[in-house]
Image: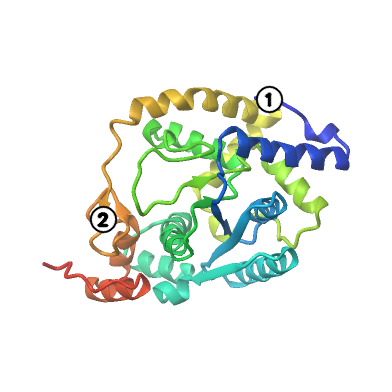
Amino acid sequence: MRYQDHKTMSDEEFVTYFENKVADTINRFEMIKQGDKILVACSGGKDSTVVLYLMKKFGYDVEAFTVDVIIGKYTKQNLENLKKMCTQIGVKLHEKSFKDSYGYSLCYIKARLYQKDVKLKSCTICGVLRRTLLNQGVRENKATKVVTGHNMDDEIEAVMMNLFKNNLKVSARLGPVPGILKHGSFIQRIKPLYFCSEDEVERYSKLKKFPVEYGYCPCSIDSQRRDVANFLEEMEKINPLVKFNIMDHFVKVLPKLRKKYAGVQESLETCIGCGEPSSRELCRACQILEQFEPREEHTRSRSKVLNMPELNVLA
């Protein structure tokens, strides 16, 4: 990696630099092959909007997919912005929502769990349940690659959280082309913005005048990731290269981490509740939903969502 300060660049120079960096990342890691159908996981935020635009600009066969978790005005505005963006650049948008799929909004699910003394944070619930719907949407639309908007800051925060938890095995699954485990129901994720800082992504989005709301999700206020991000911002005041140095080091050690943990990753089975790949009998999403509602109701609703026959999970 070579550090370049985008703040010293003119707007025109920066746009060229940014687009070239994303294209180079795609080519360097052979993220996309001829004939791939790309599905971009979109939230309506700056990162997924930027990567969606670039996938279209680079000429790939691309469509967008979003999950509305229903956080009041925040997600409503993001969805409106995403629809506007997709119309502007001529990209088909596929939608799912927590309300249609699970029967309730994210905030209601968290509140109901809290009443049952299940104190999961919003980001945990949202991430797990959203990934299940994304996996389903990917297969329904026969995509061969899933593009996410993860940027360099996101990756660094994940690396640091795993380090604080002494969980290098999870870090081995990270990277621009993440994952170690293979399963027929898993479609490869890729991160074209992997080497782009959050500041760079925001600058590009603003220069292009994309319809985007900037700022944090209102439900992430209690997340550990937010705490780590704040910590890194303070460290950056002492050492402006701290994020770059962490990323540079991680990219160098990632091949060794993958080699070390390739033989000790959990084997993947099929969740008895929903049929999704899982390292446990019941996947994380089904565990959350089972705590949220009685198992019989949970099984019926999950079978309906995933178009599967009801399973006798009480046997």
Work out whether residue 104 can be spotted: no
Near mark 2 (Cα within 10 A), the count class, few <14, some 14-19 or many ≥20, is some
For image coordinates 35% across by 41% down, the residue present is: 181
- 203 or 50, which is in the foreground? 50
Q: Mark 1: which amino acid?
A: Asn
Q: Where does label 1 land, which residue?
A: 239
Query: Percent position (x, y) of residue 19?
Result: 74, 42
Q: Which mark is residue 270?
A: 2
Q: Mark 2: which amino acid?
A: Thr
For image coordinates 56% across by 54% down, the residue present is: 38
For the residues labelled 1 and 2, the Cα–Cα distance comes to: 46 Å
For image coordinates 47% across by 61% down, the residue present is: 142
Could you tell which of marks 1 and 2 lies nearer the N-terminus? 1
Q: Where does the N terminus fall, quadrant-wise?
A: top right
Q: Which mark is residue 45?
A: none
- 156 or 61, which is in the foreground? 61
